[in-house]
């Protein structure tokens, strides 16, 4: 009888060990092109300052090596967009006037349209802009000028 309980106890322990092993989450490597969390550098003083000053944003536009994602966004007047540089090169967001429409109104610190970062953002940096004018506003990356997008402000 004690041999029976010993075998039953051993089977119970094996079942518990198997259940714990099966219940463990599978750790898969990050998808290709996305950094593993341990590879993300610490925040720079500039990014810490931007985060402190941020009022929040309604839409995120990510810039990658393929261009802006999404290419088009619709927001309400007074809402903000965060442009994030997730590429391996610089991102210089700039209003782009053309035959279809004018540049975003106003003047920035660098003398360009108010919709202008005035310099290139390094990878992992971001910039936020609040759209206070209704209209369709085209923009581009001044570093890689064929990468363009449009913000529709209602």
Image: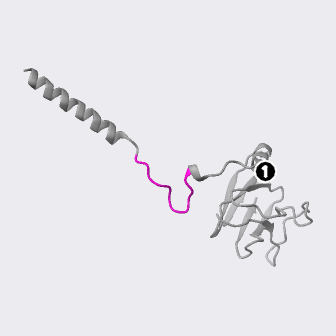
Please tell me which residue lies in front, 134 or 39: 39
Asked if residue 3 lies left or right of residue 32, the reply is left
Q: What colour-coding does the image apply?
A: one colour
Q: Position of residue 58 (x, y in %)?
A: 70, 51
Q: Quadrant of residue 127?
A: bottom right
The residues colored magenta run 26-37
Which residue is depicted at the point 80% across and 56% down?
Answer: 131
Residue 66 falls left or right of residue 79: left
Q: Which residue appears farthest toward the bottom when viewing the image?
A: 99
Q: What residue is rendered at 87% in x and 65% in y?
A: 113
Tell me, yes or no, whether the highlighted magenta stretch contains residue 130. Answer: no
The picture places residue 11, in percent across and down from the top left corner, at: 18, 32
Relative to 3, say whether 41 is above or below.
Answer: below
Q: Where's residue 133, x and y in %?
A: 84, 59
Measuring 81% from the left and 73% from the top, which residue is drawn there?
101
Say which of 36 and 131 sits in front. 36
Image quarter hosting the N terminus: top left
- The residue labelled by disc 1 is 46
**Mark 1 Cα shell of 10 Å, populated few (<14), some (14-19), many (≥20):** few
On screen, residue 62 above or below 3? below
Residue ranking furthest to the left: 1
* Residue 124 pos. (x, y %): 68, 57
Q: Nearer the viewer, residue 131 or 126?
A: 126
């Amino acid at each position: 009888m004690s041999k029976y309980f010993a075998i039953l106890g051993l089977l119970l322990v094996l079942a518990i060990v198997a259940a714990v092993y099966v219940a463990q989450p599978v750790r898969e490597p990050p998808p290709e092109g996305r950094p593993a969390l341990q590879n993300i550098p610490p925040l720079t003083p500039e990014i810490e300052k931007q985060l402190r000053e941020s009022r929040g944003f309604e839409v995120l536009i990510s810039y990658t090596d393929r261009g802006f994602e999404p290419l088009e966004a619709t927001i309400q007047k007074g809402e903000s967009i965060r442009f994030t540089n997730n590429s391996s090169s610089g991102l210089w967001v700039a209003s782009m006037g053309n035959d279809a429409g004018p540049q975003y109104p106003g003047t920035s610190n660098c003398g360009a349209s108010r919709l202008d970062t005035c310099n290139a953002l390094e990878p992992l940096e971001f910039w936020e802009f609040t759209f206070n004018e209704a209209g369709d506003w085209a923009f581009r990356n001044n570093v890689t000028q064929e990468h363009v997008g449009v913000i529709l402000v209602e």
